[in-house]
Amino acid sequence: MTATPLSALIAFIALAGAPAAQTTGQSQDPGAVLAAQSPLGLTGVEALVGIPMSSLAAAPLVCADPAPDGAKACRVARRYGDYLIDSPPPLTDKVRLKRLTLFVRGQSVEAVSLETSPDNFHALLGLLKARFGPPASSHSARIQFAHGAAPRLTMTWRAGGLRASLTDPTPFGALSVRITASHGLPKRPAA
């Protein structure tokens, strides 16, 4: 089997001490986690927060130019000429991602955002509740989109030094989850 940049990212996540199992409690064969396009699981996404960018050198990341404050966004994607094709691994066996974005400040990943179909609302809500418990806050509002007004739900969780927020829908009609460190970046053990 030939290693791909995506399999290197998944291998790093598994080797960084992040449990490869889905938050539904099922364990997963480590060999399957190392294979390209294996599900990351919510814990695999969490493991990206706080890691140094240098450890993701082999990952298929396409990064925007840094803002004046040094922050930049990097998407798990590949560039084909003038085209940018998002190529994130799935979250679970049933939840496919449209986009996985890493928000970087300095040399560390500060936050991770994933986007998926709104059809995955109940699956993501179940994963977030299993990992973080009940939401710390919930807010519903009517938002004006290009096609008209629609309801938008935002839920927030806090646990283990992390903050997770779910927004449904985004302006692009997707369901979004963002995970970030609550207060600064989490401490990672020295390699």
Image: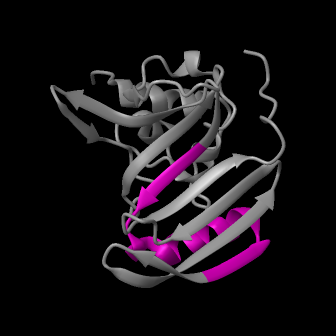
Tell me how many marks there are: 0
Q: Nearer the viewer, residue 88 or 75?
A: 75
75 to 159, vertically: above or below? above
Task: Identify the residue at image location x=55%, y=68%.
Answer: 167
- Residue 53, position as x, y percentages in the image: 57, 21
Residue 111 position, x and y percent, is 63, 42
Q: Nearest the camera: 119 or 93? A: 119
Q: Is residue 3 magenta?
A: no
Q: Residue 77: percent from the left, percent from the top?
A: 33, 35
State whether residue 123 appears in this view: yes
Q: Is residue 189 left or right of residue 123?
A: right
Is residue 24 visible in the rendered image? The answer is no
- In the foreground, 92 or 80: 80
Between 187 and 85, the one lying in front of the other is 85
Colour scheme used in the picture?
one colour
Outermost residue, left direction?
Answer: 81
- Is 134 rendered above or below residue 189? below
- Residue 55, position in %: x, y? 57, 18
At x 49%, y 46%, the residue is 40
- Residue positioned 61% across, 36% down in the render: 48
Q: Quadrant of the N terminus?
A: top left
Q: Quadrant of residue 165?
A: bottom right
Magenta-drawn segment: 112-140
Q: Quadrant of residue 17?
A: top right
Residue in view at x 59 percent, y 66 percent: 166
Where's the C terminus, which quadrant? top right
